Image (spheres, rainbow, N blue to C red):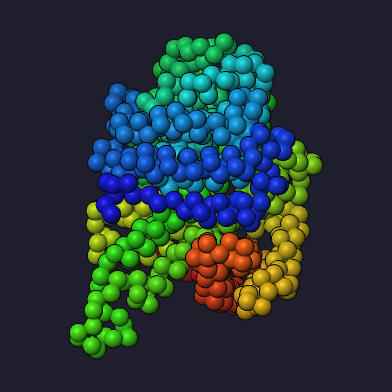
Amino acid sequence: MSSSSLHYTPNLRDIEFNLFEFLDIGRTSLGKAPFGDLDETAARQMLETFSQLCTQELAKSFDESEHNPPKLVNGEVKLPPGLKAAMGAFYDAGMHLLEVPTHLNGLGAPPSLGWAAFELLLGSNPSLAFYTLGNLLVRIIDRLGTESQKKRFLPHSLDRRWSGSMVLTEPDAGSDVGAARTKARQVDGDLWEIEGVKRFITNGESDIAENIIHMVLARPEGAAPGTKGLSLFVVPKFWVNEDGSLGEHNNVVCTKLEKKMGLKGSVTCELTFGDGKPTRGLLLGNVHDGIRQMFHIIENARMAVGLKSMAALSAGYFRALAFAKDRLQGSDLAKARDKTAPRVAILQHPDVRRMLMAQKAHAEGMRALCLFTASTQDQVELQGGHRSTAAGEADVLNDMLLPLVKGYCSEKAYELLSLSLQVHGGSGYLTDYPVEQYIRDQKIDSLYEGTTHIQALDLLMRKVARDGGATLQGLLSRIRETAEGEEGGPELKTERAALAEALGQLETMLGTLMGKLGESVYHVGFQGNRVLAAVAEVVIGWLLVRHAAVSLDRMKTNPGDKAFYSGKVASARWYCHEVLPGIAHAARMVENGNLDLMDVPEESF
């Protein structure tokens, strides 16, 4: 199947299994305040409709930007027509209203359903997803803005389909956000003037909407250095008057368009503010709380990146599976010496099956991790919202899971997409097939929104350390209950034992690393990524074992879907047999870790 055809096959069945059979959001989330009145039947229908839209309409523009990329013309970026048509179809279908609160005339869907739908968009054409950021910014302004700011931007942003961007990075301040030098000067009240240059801004400029709302981190005159001195400003491309009408161009100018390895349909650009004439912005909420406010967006973006990687792997797996069923190559390995033996589909070859199951089990495991995290976000909202006292336990669990979603999925998907390509043989290296673009489009995921090691440091130095490991221990206790219990009965005894062994090795690894911290923080620098991956793999193993238990039970009541449920059990068994034993090796590596590399002279590298 060439990349110019409708390349995308969604795994809607596994999405529905996660939401409705495992997480049971029809009972736990749907229809409960503050969410809207969607029930399970409506949610399933919505997912089915959106799946069809993604596969039949949005996927059409997947490779258009490979041949006709966005172009910078006199400070404005022109998008290829297919991308614009696809976004029009997305909005015409009302999909942008899914997670918008009901008081803004949205459907008020819980995060679990919203993220599940977002996977479909990401799989069909990941570049498109970034042009929907304006819908998130509506919710941010609704939550954090002043009443006058809400009146200015809401609901006009939704009704007119305005786009949006998050503006952090600067040429000399990449991951070190606190080194940002963009300045802000107060004019009056919440009105400020912004001056500086920002780099690597996703969706910073395009002609897909009449306006773009930029959320810009800048440092007010006289503010402290570092991240604590940053404030967050709402800076529209075209000024927005108090009544929501558009004013003049706000002197936000795109001065460079990056040429990239992949994801070419997503504009990545340099933005210049306040060069020659003022650029105006409004201090969000009229409070100087920039980095904490921006983290409402950053955390959403990190979740989105993890889902993007998972969606790419799932799409790559289905392409590899379809190819393996159709491609005739060689005889059955057991009959290799029989020159008269018929050729077989490569799906019959053990090594191809190994590669396919590695993709299948990991894609399902990553989806389980992502949607389990999303269901935790449901609980946060049901209990009062992000950073509320009542939502404390769910909130800190979500905080801890996010680096796993972003860090692990983005790293592992890149590795496994190479197997999607490998199954295709030489054909996979050709642009005739979409997998090589999947790989290029996905690679950015381990780099932006915090590199993998930044996620590892966030997990260990902030999320785990914040409460002395209590949240992590709470999650590991839930895993131990499954490992030592009877879930799935005798048929999953071996898998539960493998989970118990991996859990014990993980706890040993964590204890070892904490002990080594007394010697040097460099031990976290060397071992952090390994520990992040181990935590993620144990959590995924736990979820897959529980999926298998549900599947074994459902086979009895729904025998017509036996092939799907048998596949779920097979994924769990393979993962427990092939992945979880690796935790013991990782634990030994942490135990034997040393600081020798820090003593190697620079000139010896």
Residue 31 vs residue 592, the one in the foreground:
31
Answer above or below: position of 465 versus 126: below
Where in the figure is residue 258, as x and y percent of width and height?
34, 39
Going by the picture, which residue comes out furthest to the right? 390
Q: Which residue is found at the position 45% from the left and 18% from the top?
A: 238
Residue 43 vs residue 477, the one in the foreground:
43
Label tally: 0
Where in the figure is residue 523, as x and y percent of width and height?
60, 66
Q: Which residue is found at the position 64% from the left and 40% from the top?
A: 39
Q: Which residue is found at the position 76% from the left and 41% from the top?
A: 383
Answer above or below: position of 34 versus 305: above
Can you say which quadrant of the picture contains the C terminus? Answer: bottom left
Answer above or below: position of 519 versus 202: below
Q: Quadrant of residue 300?
A: top right
Residue 551 vs residue 459, the one in the foreground:
551
Where in the figure is residue 530, as x and y percent of width and height?
55, 66
The answer to whether one can see residue 122 in this image is yes
Going by the picture, which residue comes out furthest to the bottom? 337
Where in the figure is residue 65, as x and y percent of width and height?
30, 40
Left or right of 52 on screen, residue 500: right
The answer to whether one can see residue 256 in this image is no
Left or right of 240 on screen, residue 442: left
Can you say which quadrant of the picture contains the N terminus? Answer: bottom left
Q: Which residue is found at the position 75% from the left and 38% from the top?
A: 384
